[in-house]
Image: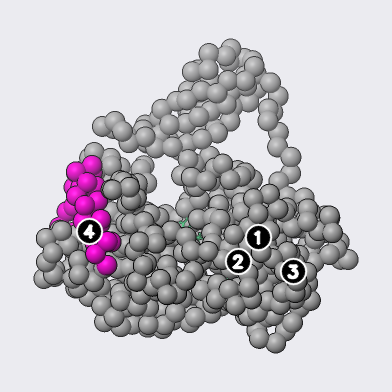
Amino acid sequence: MIKEVEIAVEPSLSRDEESILKKAAKTSGLPSDEIKSIRIRKRSIDGRSKIPVYRFLVMVSTEDSPDEKETVFNPVTRKDSPECYIIGSGPAGLFAALRALELGFRPIVFDRGKDVRARRRDLRNIMQEGLVNPESNYCFGEGGAGTYSDGKLYTRATKRGDTSRILELMVLHGADPEILIDSHPHIGSNKLPKMVEALRETIIHNGGEVHFNSRFTDIIINDNKVESFIINGSNQIKSDSLLLATGHSARDVYYLLNRAGISIEAKEFAAGVRIEHPQPVIDRIQYHSEERSEFLPAASYSLSCNLDGRGVYSFCMCPGGIIVPATTEPDTLVLNGMSVSKRNSPFANSGLVVTIGPNEWKKFEGEGVFAGLRYQSELEENSFRAGGGGQSAPAQRAVDFLNSKISADLPLTSYIPGIKSAPLHEILPSEISTYLHRALKQFGSKMRGFLTADALLLATESRTSSPIRVPRDKTTFMSISTKGLFPSGEGAGYAGGIISAAIDGTKSAEAFAKWYSGK
Ligand SMILES: Cc1cc2nc3c(=O)[nH]c(=O)nc-3n(C[C@H](O)[C@H](O)[C@H](O)COP(=O)(O)OP(=O)(O)OC[C@H]3O[C@@H](n4cnc5c(N)ncnc54)[C@H](O)[C@@H]3O)c2cc1C
């Protein structure tokens, strides 16, 4: 007999596996001498009551090793296997490559950026000198935007595919096995690069190739079919297929696709600010106590509201994290957040964003399908100017923002390039500042203490999701305009976040294999 039981455990005992398993066995009611295996399936923190508890879902069984899993990765590629060309080594591209290996193809991956180690120098340059390398930054390079990201691995997109398989592949490549049981798994930007390197090694070891400093610069289409594509302006590669996983920051790729006659369309996205608090403020609110116990992680939150049919919500919340400059172009400013695995920075930050659609980007109507993208670029340019250059960010205390008042001084921040006091209530387009204003008031009453004097707003958070979609057929995953082109991941408009991009890449590789076998 197999029983799943839920037990609550006080935080100080949450690492004491023996007592957790004992408690689960007792709760199951199964005779103790018949129990053959006990396994923790899920772990989450429940902070609803006055004293937070960990909740464990435990499987207790009187049968031998229930639920044995097959091997998670089974490559079958040979030296003479056909190629699967992939542009982009972000989560979508890398997991497409892994799946291609299992389906008997040799993945050949091209990325415009550098390998994870070489990339670090460019991150230091942007962080400390404000210098942006348009080919190597927080978004471009090995592992894509996922490498130096926060590494939160939960997704709302559970319907899109097999999340646990992606997590198991990550564990196989060095991620902490705890991600398999945590309800909000997290890896951290200090550990992600190693995992990304291990993924590359697997691809190469099994006969694939990964090329850095290799920018996809053109695609040749004939009779609505892919004929070849070009790397770095001159290296023409003949292929009737291409899996495109270039992420949502590769604006040049959207223009390139449009020039080549490939169908693309504008889509809604969200933009706003990053909000930062001292972490103890969030801990106090979420854990209902003056001080966080050493057995509890930095607390997080998730806030959302619907105002006049428009979503306003917190995005990519980073407890114990820092704010980073995630732009890809000089003279623009884009903020994002990340944290290391211990989440031990004294700050908590999150995006606070407003849905942006055709009504907002009307003034760029003349730019056709690129109107939303232009709106997004303008936000980033304005923010750069208001920050005073480099990667310094314009900032305002949240309470001053609500009172339309420039902040006389600013609190401490995690944002290393620096901040400059600025009237965000005027700099942000009115549709963003008005809705942020209304939402902040709601969030302040939902989470008492959220609107403290130390809550700081920094602009701008603009790359929440892609402002463009590369439409594809629902079943074949192929571009609706171009045979042989498989748009994938966040840049294609079909994913948002590491896990959903990895799932989408996996599915795109499967769709490619199906198409190939029917040729
Ligand atoms: C700082 C930061 C923190 C984040 N934190 C989280 C988080 O905690 N959890 C989460 O789920 N998501 C997070 N994200 C978002 C997440 O990283 C992305 O959703 C995800 O990486 C998208 O995957 P992708 O493979 O579709 O695209 P990307 O990861 O964007 O990868 C695209 C790749 O394509 C390459 N490329 C682009 N153009 C070309 C070209 N012309 N030629 C060749 N190569 C090209 C790029 O160099 C890049 O490597 C974060 C992002 C950032 C920037």
Q: Main secondary structure of the magenta part?
A: helix
Q: Residue at x 75, y 71 (%)?
A: 223
SS category of the residue bearing label 3: strand
SS category of the residue bearing label 2: loop
> Which residue is tagged 1?
480
> Which residue is tagged 3?
225
> Which residue is tagged 2?
263
Which image quadrant for residue 344?
A: bottom left
Q: Quadrant of the N terminus?
A: top right
Number of on-image labels: 4
- Queried whether the magenta region covers residue 451, the answer comes back as yes
SS category of the residue bearing label 1: loop
- Queried whether the magenta region covers residue 127, the answer comes back as no
Amino acid identity at mark 3? Lys
Amino acid identity at mark 4? Thr
**Lower position in the chain sequence, tag 4 or tag 1:** 4
